[in-house]
Amino acid sequence: MVNAHEEKVAQGLWVPLMEEFYTIQGEGFHTGKAAYFIRIGGCDVGCHWCDVKESWNPDLHPPTEVQQIADTAAHYSKTVVVTGGEPLTWNMDPLTHALQERGLQIHLETSGAYQLSGSWDWICLSPKKTKPPVDEVYAQAHELKIIIYNKHDFKWAEEHAARVGDHCKLFLQPEWSRSKEMMSSIADYVMQNPQWQISLQTHKYIGIP
């Protein structure tokens, strides 16, 4: 039997909240901007180089009322980044509605592995090979961020770029543990293919969350 807590999570009224913090966006199109991050627990995509594997098991993170999360976020920033884990594991409609009621701009970071829910001002799609995106996310993405682990990933990046809309910004980002090995190849690739830009995990370089 589903208990009351599980029912509220299923409805999206509560979400398994791993952490929330105010920081600087370190990656992609909005690099350098202040933002409040909401990290949702739960992910079965299973990327081997994930740097937040502790987010994968939703049972480790307390179900938290979305109104409470939105109230806290509104004290810090006009821009909120919902990340994970994989946020689209859950119904994001109530959370994004609560954030919008408070006049906040809402950004999503997703692998695209699940159907879209919620209403978003910016969607960053970062596909993973272990569980590719569903079709509808490509058309909605404002930003495509491909993690480059080895040279084979450039071809994979182009396959995904062919599926997003013309408005979508294209970024190549070195996987952190391989940054030194891959950075020159990424730079060369972007110079030869200037529709792409480089994304760096600048928050790790400057030592902030």
Image (cartoon, helix red, strand yellow):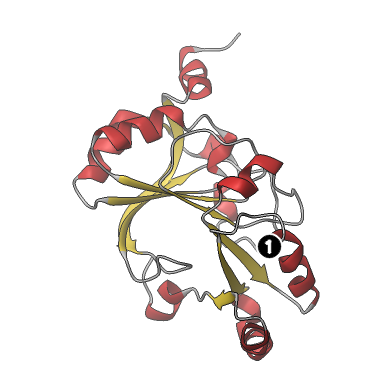
**Residue at horizontal 50%, vertical 16%?**
7
Q: Is residue 161 above or below residue 184?
A: above
- Count of numbered circles in the view: 1
Q: Position of residue 149 (x, y in %)?
A: 71, 74
Horizontal placement of 112 versus 31: left or right?
A: right
Q: Is residue 137 above or below residue 7?
A: below
Horizontal placement of 114 versus 120: left or right?
A: right
Q: Position of residue 58 (x, y in %)?
A: 55, 37
Q: Position of residue 98 (x, y in %)?
A: 32, 31
- Three-letter code, disc 1: Ala
Determine whether the residue tagged by mark 1 lies in a helix, strand or loop.
Answer: helix
- Which quarter of the picture shows residue 145? bottom right
Residue that numbered label 1 is attached to: 161
Q: Which is nearer the eye, 82 or 139?
A: 139
- Which quarter of the picture shows residue 169? bottom right
Can residue 48 be seen from the camera position used here?
no
Q: Which is nearer the eye, 148 or 121?
A: 121
Q: Residue furthest left?
A: 75
Q: Residue furthest front?
A: 166
- Which quarter of the picture shows residue 195? bottom right
**Residue at horizontal 55%, vertical 57%?**
52
Quadrant (top left, top right, bottom left, bottom right) of the C terminus: bottom left
**Residue at horizontal 55%, vertical 76%?**
197
Q: Position of residue 30 (x, y in %)?
A: 40, 65
Quadrant (top left, top right, bottom left, bottom right) of the N terminus: top right
Can residue 179 be seen from the camera position used here?
yes
Q: Is residue 103 above or below residue 166?
A: above
Q: Which is nearer the eye, 59 or 82?
A: 82
The crowding category of the residue bearing disc 1, from other C-alpha atoms within 10 Å (few below 14, some 14 to 19, many at least 20), is many
Horizontal placement of 202 versus 141: left or right?
A: left
